[in-house]
């Protein structure tokens, strides 16, 4: 049979007379709805008995995002959570307001794989040793759908973070791929990477020290921020396949990360409010 719930009004009256049992909302709640539509095309073409392969592709994305979050609690109705968002037109949180954003992103990729000495083993003095040497060049772009979270301090929703990568590699294969080595250099630019806006407590304190007492200044809130970074480096990899069941790999890499723009929205806010 079913067990009756212990925590009900009758049980509370017997344990603690005069108390009231009720369901209340507490904590944080968020609503996020997303829709992704895209179209793409790709092509791969080989030339000169596959000594040269050219690849290319294009993709167009449409991202629709609808977001609301907890902007307060209504004490008069049992602390029920008030859902809404910051309206950029008014600069304040509004109950029931949906923060919507439609973004369009175009991305493409291109690549070249070349084995210029393939099949020329007997026609070149060092053809036997040059034949396994290959050259690879790639360029690619991609983006990330923004995860659920707060908007910028302006009320705007963040665009999808975008990145682009260029890499060049030398490959040398032995015994038809039983073992091969690769030396690769790459460079990636990451644009609009999302994070939480920092130092918001310091912003509250500065306005408070200046004599402001209104919530718009001393309760700054939690917002998103963006950063642009650049990642580059060189990698060397040696791979051996002694059998179908065994693969051995040795890899060495030396990445370098550069911060191009950090705390972009915080810098913008400070600049706009500095005399």
Image: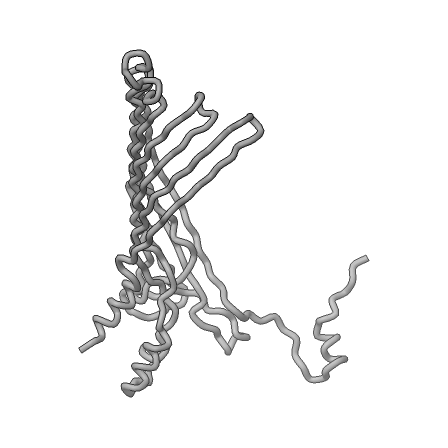
> What residue do we see at 31% from left, 48% from top?
232
User: In this view of the protein, which residue sits in the foreground, 210 or 73?
Assistant: 210
Query: Total marks drawn?
Result: 0
Q: Which residue is most to the left?
A: 275
Can see residue 56?
A: no
Q: Most extreme residue toward the right, as rendered?
A: 1
Q: Is residue 274 left or right of residue 262?
A: left
Q: Tell me, yes or no, if residue 105 can be seen here.
A: yes
Whether residue 175 sits left or right of residue 137 in the image: it is right
* Outermost residue, top side: 122
**Which image quadrant: the C terminus?**
bottom left
Figure check: 133 above or below 60: above
The residue depicted at 27 percent of the width and 65 percent of the height is 89
Write down the quadrant of residue 96 in the picture.
bottom left
Q: In the picture shown, does residue 68 fall above or below 46?
A: below
Does 18 sit left or right of 197 as displayed? right
Give the percent coordinates (x, y) of residue 149: 41, 60
Task: Return the x and y of residue 29 as percentages of the image width and height.
Answer: 49, 64
Q: How is the image coloured?
A: one colour
Q: Nearer the viewer, residue 79 or 243?
A: 243
Closer-to-camera residue (185/264): 185
- Residue at image position (28%, 64%) is 265
Residue 231 image point, x, y percent: 32, 50
Q: Farthest residue toward the front?
A: 125
Q: Quadrant of the N terminus?
A: bottom right
Q: Nearer the viewer, residue 148 or 254?
A: 254
Q: Position of residue 196 (x, y in %)?
A: 38, 64
């Amino acid at each position: 049979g079913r067990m009756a719930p212990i925590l009900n009004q009758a049980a509370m009256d017997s344990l603690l007379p005069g108390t009231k049992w009720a369901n209340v909302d507490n904590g944080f709640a968020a609503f996020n709805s997303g829709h992704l539509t895209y179209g793409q095309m790709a092509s791969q073409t080989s030339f000169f008995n596959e000594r040269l392969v050219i690849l290319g592709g294009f993709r167009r994305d449409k991202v629709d995002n609808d977001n609301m979050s907890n902007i307060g609690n209504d004490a008069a109705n049992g602390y029920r959570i008030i859902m809404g968002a910051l309206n950029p037109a008014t600069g304040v949180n509004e109950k029931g307001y949906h923060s919507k954003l439609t973004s369009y992103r175009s991305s493409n990729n291109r690549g070249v794989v070349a084995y210029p000495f393939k099949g020329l083993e007997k026609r070149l003095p060092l053809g036997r040793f040059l034949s396994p040497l290959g050259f690879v060049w790639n360029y690619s772009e991609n983006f990330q759908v923004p995860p659920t979270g707060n908007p910028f301090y302006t009320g705007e929703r963040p665009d999808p973070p975008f990145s682009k990568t260029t890499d060049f590699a030398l490959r040398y294969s032995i015994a038809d791929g039983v073992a091969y080595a690769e030396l690769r250099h790459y460079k990636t630019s990451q644009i609009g990477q999302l994070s939480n806006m920092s130092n918001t407590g310091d912003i509250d304190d500065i306005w408070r020290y200046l004599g402001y007492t209104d919530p718009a200044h001393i309760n700054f809130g939690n917002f998103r921020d963006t950063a642009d970074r650049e990642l580059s480096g060189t990698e060397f990899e040696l791979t051996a396949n002694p059998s179908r069941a065994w693969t051995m790999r040795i890899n060495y890499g030396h990445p370098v990360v550069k911060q191009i723009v950090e705390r972009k929205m915080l810098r913008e806010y400070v600049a706009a409010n500095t005399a």
